Amino acid sequence: MESQNRCSVIIVGAGISGITAAKVLAKNGVEDILILEASDSIGGRLKKHDFGSVSVELGAGWIAGVGGRKSNPVWELAVQTGLRTCFSDYSNARFNIYDRSGEKFPSAVADYTYKKAVASAIQKLGTDQDSLHTAYASDDPRISTKPETPIELAIDFILHDFEMAEVEPIATYVDFGEREFLVADERGYEHLLYKMAEEFLFTSDGKILDNRLKLNTVVRELHHSRDGVTVTTEDGCVYKANYVIVSVSIGVLQSHLISFNPSLPSWKTEAIEKCDVMVYTKIFLKFPYKFWPCGPGKEFFIYAHEKRGYYTFWQHMENAYPGSNILVVTLTNEESKRVESQSDQETMREAMGVLRDMFGTDIPEATDILVPCWYNNRYQRGSYSNYPIYADSQMVENIKAPVGRVFFTGEHTSEKFNGYVHGGYLAGLDTGEALLEEIKAEKERETNNESMLQPLLAITLSKTEAVASLRNYDIHRQLFHSNSKRGLAEVTL
Ligand SMILES: Cc1cc2nc3c(=O)[nH]c(=O)nc-3n(C[C@H](O)[C@H](O)[C@H](O)COP(=O)(O)OP(=O)(O)OC[C@H]3O[C@@H](n4cnc5c(N)ncnc54)[C@H](O)[C@@H]3O)c2cc1C
């Protein structure tokens, strides 16, 4: 089924980057847009879920980078919309490390192991990038001062899968500050996006009723040429536009859910392939009552096991939602994938085993479990991008660069803040503005071409012919434009 009208811009994906880019366009006069979203709601990786009588965040949970010299734009949005947040103090986590017999490691041991691991990580990251690349590729012993004991493995996991998965200094903390706030609001983190959407889409009673947003619409093919783009969806609908913005995750781009016709150039596909995708899974467990320590400095605790990343990082939700009796354990990468492929009952059994190790056999059984599956979600294929440590700026540029009329946005296109909500937001702003510039430039080219066409007609045609041809002016104009665009497009590409 082909849609009647050709619009200016189609935006694929309604996460924070897609909605932000759409807002930039709409607010600047490009209102004939169409947002196609595969799932049944806007938000993407901002996704709340009602669990155990409170609202938990399956995707992004924290506003990271607050209190610094610049203001984090997502924090500003949160303040404007009155989003309820809760300060997270991770600094004590390292003093709450349990071994398999439930003993807490003495503070001095934990502190020493932590500092040693940080020093070693900084030393590794300080190695010059070329030799680091070679070292990684060849298993060089310089970078394999391997953590071996359970406590070393646990701290290594915390440092590399949480705090320092990025090259120091981390732009988010340098620019916006080191504080992190957990979103603890019944309306969810995604509420920020609804408020943003309200500014340019028609809404009523908190629902978006604008037919420029199409939910449950999975884009499968994107045909692009110098003249425009044609987007085909899984349900066989065809939409045409002058431009498209693709805001799907790097995991989706790698998965080939969307086929590009003609194929994307190799500089683009190689950059996409090179980017790592992190899987990060927060598993929520509901209990009839609390049996874990609460109070200052106790929100986060760590389980040290001989298998790296095995139910290592825990958080209780009493600070966010007092009386909720919910624990969250975070798994990443291979452990996330393993858990996604097994039943929730099996995961609950494993998690309960770990909790019994830490807190004894008398603890109550969890009454409910929630295991989000970001990796097996065909509209995500992972949690967020992670540029390889040896990534060069060209790779990042190539991930972001448009290909003709196809523009790219999303957290993975944010050189400084990839992996974060504010990365998605700033990327959306950037792409929206870049496309506005391109639309303006195209209009200017068209105006120039039209003014060149008029004298040409007067010279080459008799009066009667000119009158007749004016009736066909539109056809001429289209032909002329498509030819001139061809020339210009070659320059732009
Ligand atoms: C578990 C988890 C924890 C996180 N924790 C944090 C955190 O604490 N703090 C933080 O700042 N960031 C965090 N992040 C990262 C943050 O959520 C993302 O960086 C950000 O939300 C990405 O926004 P986006 O617009 O780039 O992509 P998305 O939100 O993924 O938007 C892309 C949209 O495209 C849609 N789509 C995909 N394929 C198609 C298709 N074929 N057709 C149509 N639509 C399609 C998707 O459904 C999605 O809605 C976390 C992410 C996860 C998953």
Image (cartoon, rainbow, N blue to C red):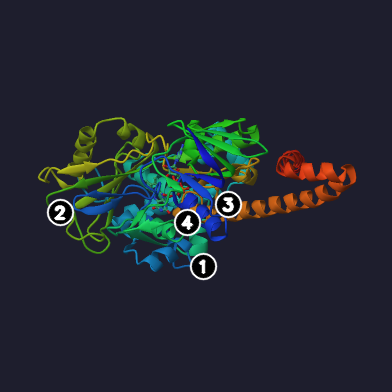
Q: Earlier in the sequence, mark 3 or mark 2?
A: 2
Left or right of 357 on screen, residue 95: right
Left or right of 405 on screen, residue 77: left
At label 4, which amino acid type do we have? His
Please identify, in this view, whether the residue under mark 1 or under mark 2 is nearer the observer: 1
Q: State how far apart marks 4 and 3 are (Cα).
A: 14 Å
Q: Residues within 10 Å of mark 1 (few under 14, many from 20)?
A: some
Q: Are marks 3 and 1 in contact (CB under 8 Å)?
A: no
Q: Are marks 2 and 4 in contact (CB under 8 Å)?
A: no
Q: Secondary structure at mark 3?
A: helix
Which residue is label 4 attached to?
422
Q: State how far apart marks 3 and 2 are (Cα).
A: 47 Å
Please identify, in this view, whether the residue under mark 3 or under mark 1 is nearer the observer: 3
**Residue drawn 33% across and 63% down?**
85
Q: Residues within 10 Å of mark 2 (few under 14, many from 20)?
A: some
Which residue is label 2 attached to?
290
Specify the farthest residue to the left. 362
At label 3, which amino acid type do we have? Thr
Q: Residues within 10 Å of mark 4 (few under 14, many from 20)?
A: many
- Residue 257 x %, y %: 47, 32
Q: Secondary structure at mark 1?
A: loop
